[in-house]
Image: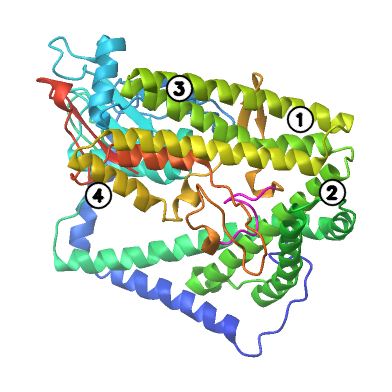
Amino acid sequence: MADTPQVIVRDDPSGKKKATARRGMMRMLCGLLVMLSVPAVWLFPIVMSSISTARAANQYYPNVEIYDQTSSFGAINGQSLQSELGQVPFKQPVKLVVLSTDTVPTGNFNEAILNYARSSHKEWLSASGNKWADGLVILAVSPSYRKVGTYFGEDTKVSSSKQDKIQEAAKDDFRAGRWSAGMVEAAKEAARYVPDANGNSTYDGELPPGPAWFVSFLGLVTVWKGFKLRRESRRNLRQAREHWENVQADHNRAERAFALIGDSGKYHDELELRYTEYEANFRIAQEKWAEIGTPRFWEYFSAVLKDKTDTLLSLTSSMDSTDDTVFSASEFFNLGSGWVDAWMKEIGPVIEDLTALGELVTSVSKEMGTPDAMRGQEEILRWIVDQQALIVQLKDQIGQGAVTPVNALETLDRIANETRNWVKGVVEASLKADTTKLGQERYEKWETMQDKSDGAATVGYKGSYRLNGTLHTYDPSSTIRLNTQSAGVSADTLKSIAFGSYRMPGWESDTYIYQSMWYQQHTYNTAHTWTHSSDSSDGSYGSSGGGFSGSGSSSSF
């Protein structure tokens, strides 16, 4: 299949494509020349040593144990996480323990893992209780506290710098919410560094220091970046092509669906704004496809093409979600055959926020332990159950004609707003209960985080929820009610909206753009456990560690 869908490909009279190709070619040639400028006598023994070690190493597949206390791990590459990890070869027999937990009462993740082992898995500890057991490798993550930890027996332990590398290998996936993928990457990195039965570890790539190596490293980075640009540009074009083909196939139908949307009340302006942007982006995308054309080989190594494909992917992805929103809105407001599916998608963010509130108040009240806190927990949990029951009733009432679609969405708005009031009250009650100077600083940190918009992209809606014991999945970007992941919502609008509203330019009324309460759970956990210490890798086991000195550390992501 050609790189360019069915659009007119222009000639290159200005020579822009040739110039882009020249930039890519020069990047790669200069990078290779600089990289190979290091004397071969430095590189040859290093490479030969690495090859010799790899050939000599025996392979042992680990005994995998998974303890998923946060229900974060799922299938990966069509296989269970247990199966994927079981295929990662180590150089000696190991027990690979994978743990997810949000039970971090003191904020010290190392201490939390040690206490969990002491209370539930004493077999993870040595006979003396002061070390981790031989043959043990523990990979742990806290999705809410954004912590990753690695812990090792005396015969499997690695240096702190290698522990950092193992943790770093997982962080990109963890930041994106790909918990299983992150664990697999961490396990692969651990397998590189955990020594064999004789204590021999694979060479970790730290070459001798010196100006020549620094120059070579710069060349290597340049070449690596060129291939990275090529890979990402090709991936962007492939994904953009898939979205664009969907958009082209649905374009006329989306136009008809938007024209046929019935009474949509206050939601009409939001839908019209998004549809207007959809049409404008459609024309822009045609221009972008024509401008990119069929990239030449060397263009892929240029940042210019990467920037263009980033823009194109963002446009086509947004349009693909927007036409889904239009179809859902048309079905829902007209009570067409697909209105139930549209409704089940609309309630997704609301149910997720209720779930986040329930987890937050349970955690906070348990920690505070006061009678008032426990009574508050009971009240909020009863309210959550009532709102979930009301949401279930609304579907029946819509079908019976007792409630209009607009009224139903307004009820979801009310529930969402009250959920935010509850969350804010719980957070403030917990943070203000600590009247020390550190407590005041933690509250100020939480307030500061409310003014930041970056969290909306990193800790958003998960796209799944449980209702009456049934798991439902949905696309947060294509709901009628706006949220921070909605297609067409600019990052510029993601201001202090977690507990308020955002006034769209030129609009007469406030329009709510809902931010996930998972983000508020994250900001609370971050502020509540904040200290003056740095966020770098930590090897302390806290006040309850006693004389424990097992190898291990944790860090934030």
Q: What's the amino acid at mark 4?
A: Gly
Report whether 225 appears left or right of 415.
left
| Quarter of the view holding residue 51 | top left
Mark 4 falls on what kind of element?
loop
Please name the residue that numbered disc 3 is placed on: 377
Magenta residues, dominant SS class: loop
Q: Are marks 3 and 2 in contact (CB under 8 Å)?
A: no
Residue 330 disc label? 2
- Residue at 32% x, 23% y is 367
Q: Secondary structure at mark 2?
A: helix
- Does 108 sit left or right of 277 as displayed? left
- Magenta residues, as a range? 481-490
| Percent of width and height locating residue 225 | 41, 64
Whole-number angstrom distance, CA of label 3 to CA of label 2 = 40 Å
List the residue tagged with mark 1. 394
Q: CA distance from mark 4 to mark 2?
A: 58 Å
Percent position of residue 219, x then y: 31, 68
Going by the numbered disc 1, the residue's amino acid type is Leu
Asked if residue 185 can be seen in this view, the reply is no
Q: Amino acid at mark 3?
A: Gln
Q: Nearer the viewer, residue 360 or 104?
A: 360
Up-down: is 499 above or below 93? Answer: below
